[in-house]
Image (cartoon, rainbow, N blue to C red):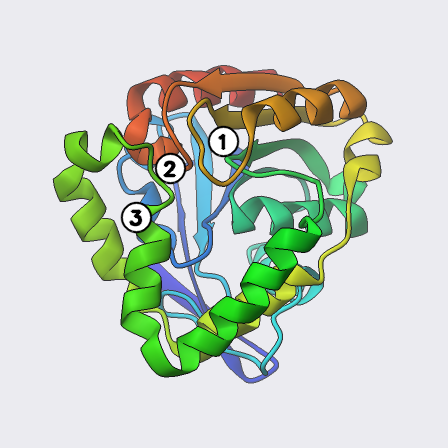
């Protein structure tokens, strides 16, 4: 059941189902909570699953023109306070992982485990920062083509054929993202800092999941990050969208991770 709260006069949409350990699923850029629809049924029997539509995505409103990771995190924390959840596990996909890192910075003692799914605690490279600036300029005039192009590039070459129908549905959801939501989130990602130390300095369970053929996040770089931050690393065979490309393997990995938190 979809619910909502007001945060600084912005509507924040979320869902809350199941009983047990609280697990917060945070979707990524150009996604919304529906991305978890094929993952949650396999986990909800033993867990309390909370999903949140982040600012400017899904059914949640925008809040200004820069959605920093800290601002995103504040909205997640507001939902958790509303639900009276004191300790929780975080699973963040891509941008959702960056938001999870901001939550971990502010609330390390509340977190039992943190999974960076196709995500990283590293900051953007200078090259990626430049690309984000260019994308935000393009979004103002050619948003649909920009989304179609960038979304397709998230999948491995093989997956673009194998999961053609699933990609089409996910793209339809992506195109519902308002331009302001796109620009505000992209700028927030551009300015986020490196947060390796948040992982290395805390004792909660840490898991990084990456795709071997991820066009966005390099698996070799993830190996270095995992070693530096004392995090477990799982490398799946697909690209950036493991919930589609490696669904069954992902569910198995998450079950083990959640049980260990």
Residue 171, percent across and down? Answer: 25, 55
Q: Toward the viewer: 227 or 157?
A: 157
Q: Is residue 163 visible?
A: yes
Residue 101, percent across and down? Answer: 69, 45
User: Circle 1 is placed at which residue position?
Assistant: 20
Residue at (28, 70) in percent of width and height? 144
| Of marks 2 and 3, the one in the foreground | 3
**Secondary structure beneath label 2:** loop
Q: Toward the viewer: 22 or 98?
A: 98
User: Circle 2 is placed at which residue position?
Assistant: 241
Label 3 to label 1: alpha-carbon separation: 36 Å
Q: Quadrant of residue 158?
A: top left
Picture quarter with the C terminus: top right
**Secondary structure beneath label 1:** loop
Residue at (18, 42) in percent of width and height? 166
Tag 3 or tag 2, which sits nearer the N-term? 3
Q: Callout 3 environment at 10 Å: few (<14), some (14 to 19), or many (20+)?
A: some
């Amino acid at each position: 059941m979809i619910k909502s709260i007001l945060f600084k006069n912005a509507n924040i949409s979320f869902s809350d189902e199941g009983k047990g350990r609280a697990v917060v699923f945070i979707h990524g850029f150009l996604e919304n909570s529906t991305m978890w629809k094929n993952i949650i049924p396999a986990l909800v029997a033993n867990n309390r699953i909370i999903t949140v539509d982040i600012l400017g995505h899904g059914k949640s409103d925008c809040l200004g023109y820069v959605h920093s990771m800290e601002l995103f995190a504040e909205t997640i924390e507001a939902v958790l306070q509303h639900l009276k959840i004191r300790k929780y596990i975080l699973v963040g996909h891509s941008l959702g992982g960056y938001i999870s890192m901001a939550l971990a910075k502010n609330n390390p003692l509340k977190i039992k485990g943190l999974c960076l799914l196709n995500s990283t605690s590293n900051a953007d490279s200078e090259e990626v920062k430049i690309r984000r600036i260019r994308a935000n300029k393009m979004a103002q005039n050619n948003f649909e083509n920009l989304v179609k192009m960038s979304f397709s590039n998230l999948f491995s070459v093989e997956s673009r054929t194998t999961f053609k129908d699933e990609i089409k549905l996910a793209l339809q959801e992506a195109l519902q993202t308002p331009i302001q939501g796109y620009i505000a989130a992209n700028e927030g990602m551009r300015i986020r800092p490196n947060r390796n130390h948040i992982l290395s300095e805390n004792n909660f369970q840490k898991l990084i999941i990456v795709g071997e053929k991820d066009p966005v996040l390099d698996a070799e770089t993830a190996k270095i990050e995992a070693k530096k931050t004392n995090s477990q690393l799982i490398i799946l065979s697909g690209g950036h969208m493991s919930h589609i490309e490696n669904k069954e393997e992902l569910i198995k990995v998450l079950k083990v991770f959640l049980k260990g938190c």
